[in-house]
Image (cartoon, rainbow, N blue to C red):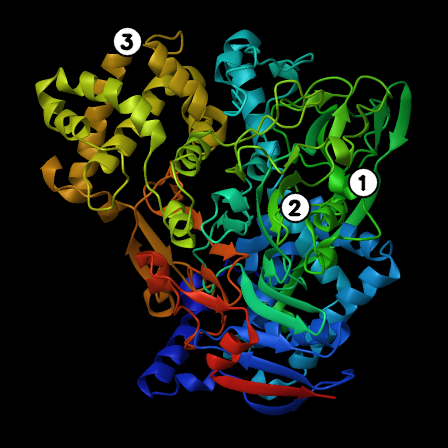
């Protein structure tokens, strides 16, 4: 008889670990979770000795006589600090998280196996040229050299009974694809758009579709009415809401790399130092310590790099060298489409491609699920992944559907694999022209890079491969009706959105719509509302040359331009009623800064959130309204347009009545959280950044292992990004995961801070030592010159052959 399936109780699952850590703290033995930081240490494969200097923050600066030893040493050093984090990421990306958490991870594992990051990574590994394969292999060898040192392994492995597995090229590639998945978050938009069409019809749905306003060209472009540019499937044929598997895929809650971000580059003419300055603050879910980025210095006689990359990937993706500086944001180029397939009525194992019947490709995937009652502590479950010529079937048991329809997903990175990843070229580039050439090969990830060189040139370039669609524009799922390929090719790299040496003296992106009005291709319909970019434009266009400190302050600017538009209307509606007058007065006096000590930001966010539900819930229903509100890129600008217009067919009552009703709901909500007097409310009292350990995300023990709860200003709409989950307000879910300002005129340092630390080892001194400076705005530096690196070195390790 099969063992009874066990749903893992997180409290029990981690109780031993938590108690063990408590004992460690109480006995003063937190130093047990450490590794050899000084002296000599043997690594197989090195050609010469490598020197590793660590500064007061634990950041490693790796000195090597050659590039091969440098990359091998980077793998080793990264594993010293982040091996357990790398292991967890690999389990997640490869669809193996159930091995750690039991059936609670099964839904995520099924999605990961269906999408096939690891399948495609293995395929891509076989297509790499020798140089790129060697580059990734060197890093893997460094990681594995550390993994072999049992005495130095993180305590997390020992207490959880896990042994690290060998790292491989495909592990690094799978993480690259995992990152790329979140930079093309269009599936959620397609599902929402289709559900809206099914709820209210295509004409009325158009009023809700994203506006996609490019602030740089809005005064010169003619307005275009948004359409789906293609035939819409009927509700009776495509009831997406009845498919929990597909809806879960659209919600995409399994991805930690929901990349947002701000970046900009100032030309010498706008820089106080006379050299370009690059600023970047990538916005991710950075709540899990120590954070998603690993900072280090990489130095050879020919190259000097200080910056960050994701643990598991070699090189540098954000940072500076002796010649260039670079930062990135998400461009959200639309590389994902859902297709409505038709099952062959004569054979359920085949699908129709026009008049032809084709067999599904069939993959069997076996998932190991932790279960203490099973023999060996695990049970296995087999799933079937079906494949069409476009990609995997992502729909599950679609209740209420005509069974002749299934939904497949097509994603361009799986079809545009290059022999080079381009990542190795970034840190070796010596000019803007060389950066531009290297970015050409970064096809899996849809990013905006801004960069500059010491000669004063600067640029912005998007990456990835965007399909050219024959019919439709990717806004809703596309029904396959014949054998013609709906993707006719890819937007040429030279025609991707880009700009170089702009006359205004700076370039920047804030995930906003960057496509010019005369652009001949469909690029995306998923882009941030332009509030952050408009505020950046105000700051960058203000008089005077900008210092590093200016850019540092810009990253923490909390002026809310959406509130500046909406609040005059909102406050007037509240002032008209005695029961909301006090809230209206507070809003009326507000300067629109999302200061954590002010009441107004809390009132505005609460009222506007309830206003959203008052507008849409009657027509869309509760479930769809909740799905929509958590995708603010979809609705923010269209709702603002309705509010400022004063009336809309979507308003079930007058705008001001809806605002009053929403304010009453907001008052009840805030009263429960902060008391009855709005004058005493504070945004920071409800708007927290809670930093947690991967061992315990919430509940019993999370406070002991985590990094605390911190009142935070800012919001979804400010440069100081602090987005909350609109369905579970108001704790911060997305914020800056790094703040960096790199001045190419400063030979000594980079201004940078993380919301965590360098080390992924619980209770290590550098596990969360940057949290305080991150929250306060205190300046922290990563060192660049030999003099400063050695001046600030506190530990010295030699890696020897």
Q: Is residue 427 left or right of residue 267?
A: right
Question: Residue beneath label 1, please?
Answer: 415
Vertical order, 540 against 375 (above or below): above
Vertical order, 61 against 370 (above or below): below
Label 3, secondary structure: give it. Answer: loop
Sequence order check: which comes first, mark 2 or mark 3? Answer: 2
Sequence order check: which comes first, mark 1 or mark 3? Answer: 1
Measure how far apart labels 1 and 3 are at the Cα level.
50 Å
**What residue appears at the point 78 percent right and 32 percent down from the top-left corner?**
492
Question: Residue beneath label 3, please?
Answer: 654
**What residue appears at the point 86 percent right and 24 percent down from the top-left corner?**
353
| Residue 54 coordinates in the image, percent (x, y) | 52, 79
Q: Circles 2 and 3: CB distance less than 8 Å?
A: no
Label disc, if present, on residue 180 of the rendered structure? 2
Label 1, secondary structure: give it. Answer: helix
Furthest-right residue in this view = 356
Vertical order, 295 against 275 (above or below): below
């Amino acid at each position: 008889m099969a063992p009874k399936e066990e749903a893992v109780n997180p409290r029990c699952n981690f109780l031993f670990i938590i108690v063990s850590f408590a004992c460690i703290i109480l006995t003063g033995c937190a130093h047990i979770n450490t590794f050899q930081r000084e002296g000599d240490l043997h690594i197989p494969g090195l050609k010469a000795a490598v020197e590793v200097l660590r500064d007061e923050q634990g950041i490693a600066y790796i000195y090597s006589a050659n590039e091969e030893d440098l990359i091998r040493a980077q793998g080793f050093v990264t594993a010293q600090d982040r091996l357990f984090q790398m292991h967890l990421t690999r389990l997640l990306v490869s669809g193996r998280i159930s091995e750690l958490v039991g059936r609670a991870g099964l839904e995520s594992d099924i999605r990961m196996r269906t999408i096939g990051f690891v399948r495609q990574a293995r395929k891509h590994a076989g297509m790499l040229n020798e140089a790129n394969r060697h580059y990734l292999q060197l890093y893997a060898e460094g990681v594995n050299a550390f993994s072999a040192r049992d005495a130095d392994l993180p305590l997390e492995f020992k207490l959880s009974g896990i042994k690290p597995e060998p790292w491989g090229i495909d592990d690094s590639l799978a993480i690259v694809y995992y990152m790329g998945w979140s930079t093309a978050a269009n599936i959620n938009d397609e599902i929402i758009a289709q559900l809206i069409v099914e709820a209210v019809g295509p004409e009325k749905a158009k009023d809700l579709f994203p506006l996609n306003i490019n602030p740089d060209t809005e005064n010169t472009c003619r307005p275009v009415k948004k359409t789906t540019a293609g035939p819409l499937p009927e509700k009776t044929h495509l009831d997406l809401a009845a498919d929990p598997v597909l809806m879960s895929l659209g919600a995409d809650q399994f991805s930690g790399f929901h990349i947002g971000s701000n970046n900009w580059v100032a030309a010498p003419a706008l820089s106080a130092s006379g050299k370009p300055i690059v600023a970047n603050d990538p916005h991710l879910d950075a709540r899990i310590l120590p954070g998603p980025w690993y900072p280090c210095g990489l130095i050879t006689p020919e190259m000097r790099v200080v910056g960050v990359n994701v643990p598991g990937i070699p090189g540098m993706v954000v940072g500076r060298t002796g010649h260039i500086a670079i930062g990135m944001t998400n461009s959200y180029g639309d590389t994902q489409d859902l297709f409505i397939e038709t099952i062959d009525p004569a054979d359920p194992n085949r699908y129709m491609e026009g008049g032809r019947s084709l067999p599904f490709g069939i993959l069997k995937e076996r998932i190991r699920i932790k279960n203490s009652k099973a023999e060996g502590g695990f049970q296995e479950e087999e799933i079937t992944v079906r494949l069409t010529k476009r990609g995997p079937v992502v729909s599950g048991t679609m209740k209420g559907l005509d069974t002749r329809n299934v939904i497949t997903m097509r994603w361009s990175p799986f079809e545009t694999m290059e022999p080079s990843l381009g990542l190795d070229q970034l840190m070796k580039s010596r000019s803007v022209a060389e950066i531009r050439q290297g970015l050409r090969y970064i096809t899996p990830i849809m990013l905006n890079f801004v960069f500059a060189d010491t000669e004063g040139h600067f640029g912005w370039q998007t990456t990835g491969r965007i399909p050219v669609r024959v019919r439709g524009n990717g806004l809703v799922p596309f029904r396959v009706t014949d054998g013609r390929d709906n993707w006719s090719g890819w937007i040429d790299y030279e025609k991707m959105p880009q700009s170089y040496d702009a006359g205004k003296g700076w370039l920047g992106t804030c995930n906003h719509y960057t496509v010019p009005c005369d652009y001949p291709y469909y690029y995306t319909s998923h882009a941030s509302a332009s509030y952050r970019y408009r505020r950046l434009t105000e700051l960058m266009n203000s008089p005077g040359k900008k210092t590093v400190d200016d850019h540092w302050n810009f990253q923490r600017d909390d002026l809310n331009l959406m509130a500046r538009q909406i609040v005059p209307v909102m406050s007037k509606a509240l002032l008209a009623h005695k029961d909301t007058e006090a809230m209206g007065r507070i809003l009326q006096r507000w300067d629109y800064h999302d200061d954590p000590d002010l009441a107004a930001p809390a009132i505005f966010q609460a009222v506007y959130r309830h206003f959203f539900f008052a507008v849409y819930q009657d027509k869309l229903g509760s479930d769809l309204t909740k799905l929509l509100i958590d995708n603010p890129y979809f609705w923010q600008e269209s709702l603002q347009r309705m509010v400022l217009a004063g009336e809309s067919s979507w308003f079930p009552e007058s705008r001001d009545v809806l605002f009053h009703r929403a304010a009453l709901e907001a008052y009840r909500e805030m009263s429960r959280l902060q008391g009855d007097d709005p004058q005493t409310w504070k945004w920071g009292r409800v708007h927290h950044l809670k930093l947690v350990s991967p061992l315990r995300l919430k509940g019993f023990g999370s406070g002991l292992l985590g990094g605390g709860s911190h009142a935070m200003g800012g919001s979804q709409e400010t440069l100081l990004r602090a987005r909350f989950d609109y369905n579970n307000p108001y704790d911060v879910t997305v914020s800056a995961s790094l703040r960096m300002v790199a001045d190419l005129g400063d030979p000594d340092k980079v201004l940078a801070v993380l919301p965590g630390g360098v080390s992924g080892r619980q209770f290590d001194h550098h596990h969360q030592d940057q949290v305080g400076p991150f929250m306060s705005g205190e300046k922290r530096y990563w060192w660049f010159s030999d003099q400063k690196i050695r001046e600030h070195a506190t530990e010295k390790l030699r890696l020897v052959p």
